[in-house]
Amino acid sequence: MALITRGFGSKTHGRDTRLPPGQTQVDDWPVLTAGATPEIAQEIWEFTVGTEDGKTVRWDWDSFRALGLEDFTVDIHCVTHWSRLGMPWRGVSLDRVFEHVETSYDFVMAHSYGGYTTNVPLEELLDGQAWIAFEADGEPLEAEHGGPARLVVPHLYFWKSAKWVQGLEMIAQDEPGFWEERGYSLHGDPWTEERYS
Ligand SMILES: Nc1nc2c(c(=O)[nH]1)N[C@H]1C(S)=C(S)[C@@H](COP(=O)(O)O)O[C@H]1N2
Ligand SMILES: [Mo]
């Protein structure tokens, strides 16, 4: 499909107002992975949240999805300057997850199968801002795009959206994850071009 769909965004002088500065719209979906693509079967998949009291809240495939799947449509922005606009997804809001988590810590380290990590402030994962996604473009997530499940935090650069996410670790202070240790911004707001630290 090479159709160019501009969706509902308004355009000023030909530039879609949904595009953050320095970004170019693409219609394909590039794959960006540091390392190999892990193969995670649904039967062994689990999602955990670890808190400061040493407790781990744990879900398997069915119990996690039973928290409530919802459809959401968002724009995604990679720090390598591509953006995809109006992308349909299906997943569980982190608001549903944190209804079951007691923590006084303000920061989160996301951990993926395969070892990737990325940090996000807790308040930026709540209030409808982040999901654990199982489907994109109406199909189960392909392994190369993080299937069976990935974090989606669309208001931050896409490296925050950990593929093959395994769980979240509550942390007291903000700490760098994989790319943040390698010079990328701790925060990663595409609208203010927080690309590098
Ligand atoms: N586990 C894991 N998650 C990851 C990455 C990775 O290498 N490993 N790359 C990140 C980066 S830099 C981007 S831009 C997006 C790319 O997602 P995509 O390959 O589905 O486009 O995934 C992010 N999540
Ligand atoms: Mo990226």
Image (cartoon, rainbow, N blue to C red):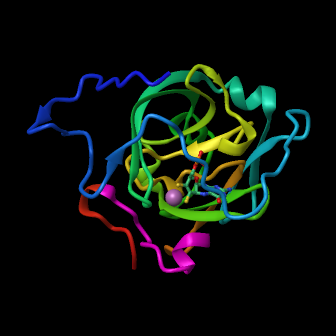
The magenta span reads 178-190
Relative to residue 3, is residue 88 drawn left or right? right
**In terms of image quadrants, where is residue 84?**
top left
Whether residue 149 is situated above or below residue 82 in the rendered picture:
above
Q: Position of residue 102 (x, y in %)?
A: 59, 51
Residue 189 sits in which quadrant?
bottom left
> What residue sits 72% from the left and 48% below the top?
164
Is residue 187 one of those drawn in magenta? yes
The number of callouts visible is 0
Q: Nearer the viewer, residue 168 or 155?
A: 155
* SS majority, magenta: loop
Identify which residue is drawn at 80% across, 31% down: 61
Residue at the left extreme of this rendering: 13
Instruction: Please tell me which residue lies in front, 177 or 19.
Output: 19
Horizontal side of 2 relative to 116 (left or right) equals left
Q: Residue at x 62, y 71 (%)?
A: 178
Q: For this view, does 154 lie left or right of residue 18?
A: right
Residue 29: x and y in percent read: 53, 40
Whole-percent x and y of residue 151?
A: 59, 45
Ligand 1: which quarter?
A: bottom right
Task: Give the vertical position of 150 relative to 197 (above or below).
Answer: above
Using the image, determine if residue 183 lies above or below residue 88: below
Residue depicted at x 76% and y 54%: 56
Q: Position of residue 52 (x, y in %)?
A: 65, 66
**In this view of the protein, can residue 127 be seen by the observer?**
no
Magenta-drawn stretch contains 8 = no
Q: Would residue 4 be visible to someone looking at this image?
A: yes
Q: Quadrant of the C terminus?
A: bottom left
